[in-house]
């Protein structure tokens, strides 16, 4: 298994270097900077291939340990999972070393110097501070170091799952720099690249992990291969769609056939298409052979060929990252397009805010997928004769519609450019969508719709969901103090600490802010009015107290914004220089008014929902007591009367 991986990585590195030389990537010099030399040009490609290979092996090995093979009944990883952890540890150390090497090479490339001239700590720190790519690689190296240490000390299934999600997060920093993160439409290009890299890492890494499990003759090979086969099909679809979108955003259709860059894009697309068709057919045959009780040799042979082709694709992708786009595709974008990724047609009118859409590949897709999964769960319940309240379905679908509207309509389009519109989106994502989501009861629906694994069967999605709901992380987040601080305290920290000013320049920061708005709102409203049982069950009086505790802080936030005399994010908004936002302070005050006014209606709705739930709970309790009285024949009342009579008799004077 190790020789196969080494051969694959060497092949990918050689192919990347050859393609860079053929396409002119070796002479690709940043305008205005001297040539950093051949060692820097080709060294970037080699360490990038090694880093990519190590990252996908780490992600795939943790995927295997967390979700493809079952843990022991005690919650500790079993033998197959432990082997996956050890492989992840080794690959994490390689990932860390190659990421640190990439810090030096990308810094040298960005400065136009040979890599041997930047080993001075002072020079290196200055370059890292000034250039985004070495900074991204430094973050990646830090994450890889955490993974390496974590894989050494972790043995429980829960922490293994946490490490898996940390490894996926390690793919993000580098994805947010480079060709996709600059120029026009960088929002669309970056979002599509995130999908592409995560799907590719799960596919390639998962395949390697299954191969390694078969080579070790693991006892859960059939289960791992079956689960991975389903995941691989989804990854292939995501990779194909996101890859095409990412390419067409950056170059025209004609450039695909007339430029070296376009030909590399075509080669990558063709390789992915061939891999998708070939891999799915061969895996399905291999899984069928395992299910029929035959050996896994056929599956391993076919998967080994697929793995080699996949690493060839990684080599093409690395060459693509070092190849300049065609000259006619590099246009001079406007200031607005550079800063937010696209131009705005004019002042925001009601029609433009409602109908001037720009689909958000991250949150727009999430809204559609969440709605589809929920409706599929409701359909499954009804097909087997179970009922599900219509009101919950309406609430969930309405929450998805609010998420889609806030991120993909004209509101989402103008949000990065105007503070007032941003604040409207903030209120929708933190105050409206989470309320609707928690009223939908998604956890209850999932637990009823997903099949139970069974007594002796390995845990599946239903068990994973239950483990998360009862995890220490969920209990900490839903603690009233923690939930209140995350929900209300983050308003003040984000906007009054300078954090928002620094975040405005980065697309990834906008993605992170929206995620925080949604999750902090969900965590707050879940124990207050959530249909799903919360890890911390509060009495209705305690829930009411949480709402009354949050209300004044939210109102004060809006008032402070309206009375503030300095502009938040002033440097960024002045760079945009939008003609219809001549008074930035007035726009900020409008945003404060939106924050103050728009928070009142959701709070009122939450209070009404809370009081209705309280009344229904009292009604259910009264009915429960009535049923108990009917079953016992008023035995409790008779016993109580007998006790009163006995006390009365004892109190009578004796003659």
Image (cartoon, helix red, strand yellow):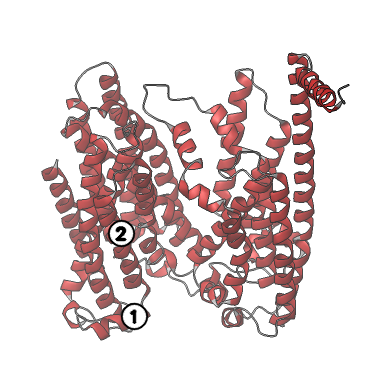
Is residue 29 visible in the rendered image? The answer is no
At mark 2, the secondary structure is: helix
Q: Which residue is mark 1?
A: 31
Q: Residue at x 57, y 81 (%)?
A: 575
Residue 177 drawn at (x, y percent): 39, 67
| Above-or-below relation of 525 to 637 | below
Query: Relative to residue 363, is residue 395 drawn left or right?
Result: right
Query: Relative to residue 198, is residue 630 drawn left or right?
Result: right
Point out which mark residue 242 bears. none
- Labels 2 and 1: the sequence-earlier one: 1
Point out which mark residue 146 bears. 2
Query: Relative to residue 171, is residue 473 drawn left or right?
Result: right
Task: Judge the density around disc 1: few (<14), some (14-19), many (≥20) Cα neighbours within 10 Å.
Answer: few
Q: Residue at x 78, y 60 (%)?
A: 600
Residue 129 drawn at (x, y percent): 36, 79
How far is the residue under mark 2 from the one under mark 1?
37 Å
Q: Residue at x 21, y 40 (%)?
A: 83
The answer to which of 408 and 425 lies nearer the viewer is 425
Circle 2 or circle 1, nearest the eye: 2
Residue 653 drawn at (x, y percent): 87, 26
* Tag 2 near tag 1, CB within 8 Å: no
At mark 1, the secondary structure is: loop
Callout count: 2
Residue 334 drawn at (x, y percent): 54, 75
């Amino acid at each position: 298994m190790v020789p196969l991986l080494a051969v694959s990585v060497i092949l990918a590195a050689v192919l990347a270097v050859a393609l860079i030389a053929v396409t002119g990537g070796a002479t690709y010099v940043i305008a205005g900077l001297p040539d950093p030399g051949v060692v820097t040009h080709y060294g970037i490609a080699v360490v990038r291939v090694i880093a990519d290979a190590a990252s996908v092996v780490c992600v795939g090995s943790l995927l295997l340990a967390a979700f493809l093979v079952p843990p022991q009944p005690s919650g500790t990883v079993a033998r197959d999972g432990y082997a996956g952890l050890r492989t992840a540890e080794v690959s994490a150390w390689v990932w860390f070393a190659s990421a640190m090497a990439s810090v030096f090479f990308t810094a040298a490339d960005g400065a136009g110097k040979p890599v041997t001239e930047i080993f001075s700590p002072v020079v290196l720190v200055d370059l890292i501070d000034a250039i985004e790519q070495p900074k991204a690689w430094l973050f990646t190296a830090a994450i890889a170091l955490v993974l390496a240490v974590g894989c050494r000390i972790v043995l429980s299934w829960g922490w293994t799952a946490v490490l898996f999600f940390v490894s996926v997060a390690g793919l993000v920093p580098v994805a947010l720099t480079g060709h996709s993160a600059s120029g026009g439409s960088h929002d669309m290009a970056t979002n599509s690249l995130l999908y592409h890299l995560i799907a590719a890492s799960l596919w390639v890494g998962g395949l390697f992990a299954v191969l390694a499990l078969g080579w070790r003759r693991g006892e859960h090979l059939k289960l791992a291969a079956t689960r991975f086969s389903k995941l691989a099909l989804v990854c292939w679809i995501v990779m194909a769609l996101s890859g095409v979108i990412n390419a067409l955003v950056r170059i025209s259709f004609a450039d695909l056939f007339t430029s070296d860059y376009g030909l590399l894009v075509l080669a990558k697309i063709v390789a992915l298409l061939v891999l998708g068709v070939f891999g799915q057919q061969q895996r399905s045959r291999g899984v069928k052979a395992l299910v029929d009780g035959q050996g896994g040799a056929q599956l391993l042979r076919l998967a080994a060929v697929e793995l080699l082709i996949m690493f060839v694709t990684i080599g093409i992708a690395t060459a693509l990252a070092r190849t300049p786009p065609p000259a006619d595709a590099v246009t001079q974008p406007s200031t607005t397009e550079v800063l937010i990724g696209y131009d705005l047609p004019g002042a925001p009118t009601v029609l433009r805010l409602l109908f001037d859409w720009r689909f958000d590949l991250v949150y727009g897709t999430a809204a559609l997928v969440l709605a589809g999964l929920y409706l599929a769960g409701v359909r499954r319940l009804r097909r087997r004769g179970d009922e599900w309240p219509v009101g919950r379905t309406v609430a969930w679908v309405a929450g998805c519609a609010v998420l889609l509207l806030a991120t993909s309509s004209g509101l989402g389009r103008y949000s990065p450019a105007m503070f007032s519109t941003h604040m409207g989106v903030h209120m929708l994502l933190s105050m409206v969508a989470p309320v609707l989501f928690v009223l939908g009861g998604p956890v209850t629906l999932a637990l009823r719709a997903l099949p139970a694994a069974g007594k002796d069967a390995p845990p599946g999605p239903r068990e994973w969901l239950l483990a998360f709901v009862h995890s220490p992380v969920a209990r900490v987040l839903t603690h009233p103090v923690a939930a209140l601080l995350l929900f209300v305290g983050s308003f003040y920290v984000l906007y009054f600490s300078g954090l928002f000013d620094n975040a405005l320049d980065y697309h990834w920061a906008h993605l992170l802010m929206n995620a925080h708005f949604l999750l902090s709102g969900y965590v707050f409203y879940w124990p207050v009015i959530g249909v799903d049982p919360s890890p911390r069950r509060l009495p209705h009086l305690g829930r009411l107290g949480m709402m009354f505790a949050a209300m004044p802080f939210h109102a004060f936030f809006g008032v402070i914004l309206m009375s503030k005399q300095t502009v938040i994010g002033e440097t960024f908004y002045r760079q945009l220089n939008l003609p219809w936002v001549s008074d930035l302070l007035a726009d900020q005050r409008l945003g404060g008014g939106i924050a103050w006014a728009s928070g009142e209606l959701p709070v009122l709705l939450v209070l009404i929902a809370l009081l209705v739930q309280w009344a229904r709970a009292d009604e259910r309790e009264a009915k429960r007591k009535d049923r108990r009285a009917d079953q016992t024949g008023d035995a409790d009342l008779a016993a109580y009367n007998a006790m009163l009579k006995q006390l009365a008799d004892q109190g009578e004077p004796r003659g």
